[in-house]
Each structure stands twice: as C-alpha cells, then as structure tokens.
Image (cartoon, rainbow, N blue to C red):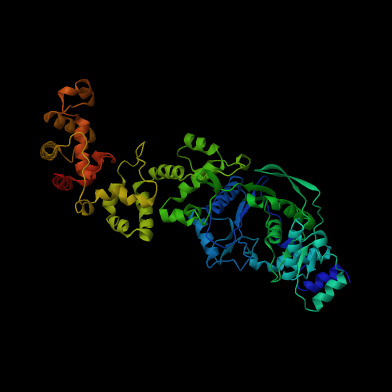
Amino acid sequence: MDYRDLANLIFPDAKEISYYEEKYPKRNLKEGAIVTRYAPSPTGVMHIGGLYQGLIAKKMAEQTEGVFFVRIEDTDQKREIEEGTSKIITALNEFGLKPDEGLISDSEEVGNYGPYKQSKRKEIYQAYAKYLIEQGKAYPCFCTTEEGEEIRKKQEEAKIRPGYYGVWAKCRNNTVEEMAEKIKQGKNYIIRFKSPGREDKKIKHKDIIKGNVEFPENDQDIVIIKADGLPTYHFAHIVDDHLMGTTHVIRGDEWLSSVPLHLQLFYELGFKAPKYAHIAPIMKNDNGNKRKLSKRKDPEAAVSYYEEEGIPEKAVKEYLLNIANSSFENWRRANPDKDVSEFELQLNKMGVSGALFDMIKLLDVSKTVISKLTAKEVYEEALKWAIKYDEELQKLLSNKEYSLKVLGIERGNKKPRKDISKWSEVKENIDYMYDEIFLEKEHKYPYQVINQKGDIDKILDIYIEKYYNEADDKQTWFDKIKELAQELGYAKEVKEFKENPEKYKAHVGDVSTVLRVALTSRTNTPDMYEIMQVLGKDSIKKRFEKAK
C-alpha cells in the first residue's frame, strides 16, 4: 500500500486537482492589475478595522483596474452568528465597497471563481488535501483531545514551545499500513500537514507594508482538515487565494507571524504565493496608553456605530484614507472637490505601527463632507436617518418645502457653514427655525452688551415697524440695521465706536446681536439675513413679542 492508496481510502470521491485548475483558469487582466479580497468570518459585529481593510483592498484593485472580491470564511461554524454574512454584505454596500465578485447578499454571488463561501467549497479543499496525502505531505492524525492536552501539559512543564511538531507529532511517523488499518477500524481522525520546516532555520520575507521581516521556519504539523471534513483557515485560504487568483493579501498584522506557515503551504502545494501587506491595527489612546480599538470597550469599534450616530459613510472613508496614507490630507487640501477615487493609495506608504483613532478629526472631516452637500442631499440623508432613529426629527422634516429652505441657509457658498458633523446633530441645529417648537418653549435670551429691557424692546419694536422689509436684498437689509442703530444712539460702524467709545452706548454689531438673540435665543447662528428670509415677517413678529 502507498500514499495514493491511503489518499483514496480517505477521500474516495475527491476529484483530481487538475479539474479545479482548469475550472478556475488564470485571470486575463492587464499587466500590473491587482486582485484583492476581503475575507471576513461571520462571527460577530463588523469592526471598523475590517472596513479599513476592505476599503484598502478595494482601492488597490480599482486604481490598477484589477478585481476586488468578497469571500466569506465560515468554516468555524460553531462561532458563526445569526445573519453574520448579511450584516457584513450590508455594511460593505452602505460604505460603497460593493465587490466586483463574490457575495452580494447572504445567498447571491457574482463571478466565475465561486462558490465564495468556504463552507460550500468542501470538495475543493478535500481534493487538495488528497493531493498532499498522495505526495506524502499530509497524513491522518488519530490523537484524541485528551492526548493533545497531555502533550501540551508536558511541553509546559518542560518549558518548551507548545505544538504538534518533531517528537511530539505522535502520528507523523505511522506507516501507511498503520494509518489505513486505524481508518478501517473506524477511528476518528483529522488531516495534518507534514511540515518540512526546521525551527532553527530562518526565512526572510519582504512585506509590502512592514518591509523586511525574518522568522523561524514553520515546523508545526498543523491541522488542515478538521473532523467535520471542513478545512482550517490556514489551509482553506491558501487553496482559495490560488484558485481565485489573489495577487495581494491585505490583512491585519496579527497574521504576520503566520507568514512562514502560509508561504510553506503555497510552496508545498506548488502554487505561486501572493504578495502580503499586513496592516497595523487602529489604536486608541487610553489614559496615555495606546491599545487596539476594542469591540468590547469602544462603541466606535463597531461599524454599526457610524450609522447609528449618523456619520456619513463618505466621511468615514475619507478619514480612513487619512489614516492609511499621510499624504492624503495634503492631496485633499489641494483637491477639495475631487472624488476620493482620484487619490492614489500606496501600500508601501502605510504606517508600520497603528494610527490613533481620533473622533474629533473624524467629525471635522464629516463637517467638511456635509458642508459640500446640497440642501436636498442633506434633507434626504437626514430624513433617512431620522426615520430609523429620531421620530421628532422625522416630524420636523415632514414639511419638506420649509425644511429645504432651512437646510439651504448658508449652503452652496464658497465658504459654506460647517455646523453639522452627523445627522444626529441636525435637530439641535435647526429646531429653533420651527415656530411649533420655538414658540412653545421657554427660552433664556443671552443678550450681550445691550441687555436692558427697555433698550431691547425699543430695538425690536422700531425694527419691525419701520425698517424690516422682506423684499430687501442683503446690503439694503444691513444698511437699515445701521440706520436703526444710528436712530437709537448706537454707533453706525464698529470703527466709529472704537474711535469714540464714550460717545455711544454700543455699536451696530450689538444691535444685530439683540435681533439675533430675540429671533433664535442663540448668539451663534448662520447668516441672520437668510434666517429672516426663511422665517418671514409673521414669524419674526411673534418671536419678537415672545422675547419682550
């Protein structure tokens, strides 16, 4: 009996690997085109770090006219959560990371290199495991869980490296006949890779992000096919990346130490290895200490957080590109109106250590993104968010025509106002513009320099009776406030007041503040002329009466 007989005994129905090599031919792409993948496990909420990896993978494929595909690595079915896959696909779609190939919903996929769910590729992995057994590069292991624990305990006591290797690999040197006999007896087994490596030898590898790295060779006989017939991650992704034509594996740097094993598997299977780019994790400043952004401790670690808060996906992507390449900020400054697709991301310019997550910076980016939207776009996005998360805001926005006017204030200018950083802030930014809310509430009016009731009442009465006209353009409107100031003994120009402060009680700016505070109960608002144009005379009169 030889290894081929053993392989046939274990996998009698598995096809020859030549079948799959023909079924999944090499991709016909232009030179330099990159094929990347996002390959998550559906075992929990989607992490912002996963979105970061997906964004970088898609960007690299796009800018080289390559292919970005999504593959779901669901071979660890005990840890899989309900709707885990659909949540991943939904998040990718919401952030504009729709793949060229792969899963597009929980049950639908596109592309010629599928299935793109590992649990549906069982026969493929078994064919390649069979091939390794035929070559004498893999073998069945009959060690029980208890035996495995005993080996680990002995290793701990002897203070040596844990694992299944060398003299500790009990089943490695069984003869083919011994292995076959145990299988025929019905003994449970898994399939292990027979590593040719030696721990005292080193491998040198050039990672695109980390640069030159050196590791001991892999000498562990890792499990490649589990007792349920499904592969382990290590084996499955090697077969998949080969057959799917992945040119660049972009993944978290927690996998960097696995490079010796993965390169060894590629080599032993006779495959060309892809290039590796290991991304540093997104970090958080925790009382002066840097740590990884944690799903358990940090709400912002979950991708769902950004939707719940109403931070636009475009802003999140801009911020992540900021983290990815330090050159992005200067590019954006030089190209304020260009789409991010025009920015050329460079993997070799990504940081070796993790960037700190900065929520203040993200919200600043978000303010800029929202400031460039039209009133209609802001209205539609805010309403979409409100329908899901804020009934009061949804009710406010039910008057579409009026809401568009409110949201249009100071929008579309060369320097639009940047007061909204997320949709959850819209209500507090605009509710004072709605009489049904403003006139019903009790307000504190933070008048500044002019704060005597008699002076305030006089300003409000004379302005509305004598000076306000809805038909006035902005210059005429402001000139009339100057005339009002002059009539009531205030300096018509701030400059005049500064030159002769003893001559005036206050100046035109202070008069404007009285009008602003009476209208809105706020000292800081968008352009007052535009506010008045939206409110109209009846509303202004009611507000002035309430303020007196």
- The quadrant the N terminus occupies is bottom right
Q: Residue 207's spot in the image, x, y percent? A: 69, 45
Residue depicted at x 61% and y 39%: 349
Is residue 67 positioned above or below 475 on the image?
below
Q: Residue 273's spot in the image, x, y percent? A: 73, 51
Q: Nearer the viewer, residue 177 or 142?
A: 142
Q: Nearer the viewer, residue 113 or 163?
A: 163
- The quadrant the C terminus occupies is top left
Residue found farthest to the front: 157
Question: Does residue 285 appear to the left or right of 494 in the view shown?
Answer: right
Question: Does residue 530 appear to the left or right of 234 in the view shown?
Answer: left
Residue found farthest to the top: 499
Residue depicted at x 17% and y 46%: 543
Tell me the quarter of the picture where residue 37 sits. bottom right
Can residue 14 be seen in this snapshot? no
Q: Residue 255's spot in the image, x, y percent? A: 66, 52
Q: Residue 346's spot in the image, x, y percent? A: 60, 41
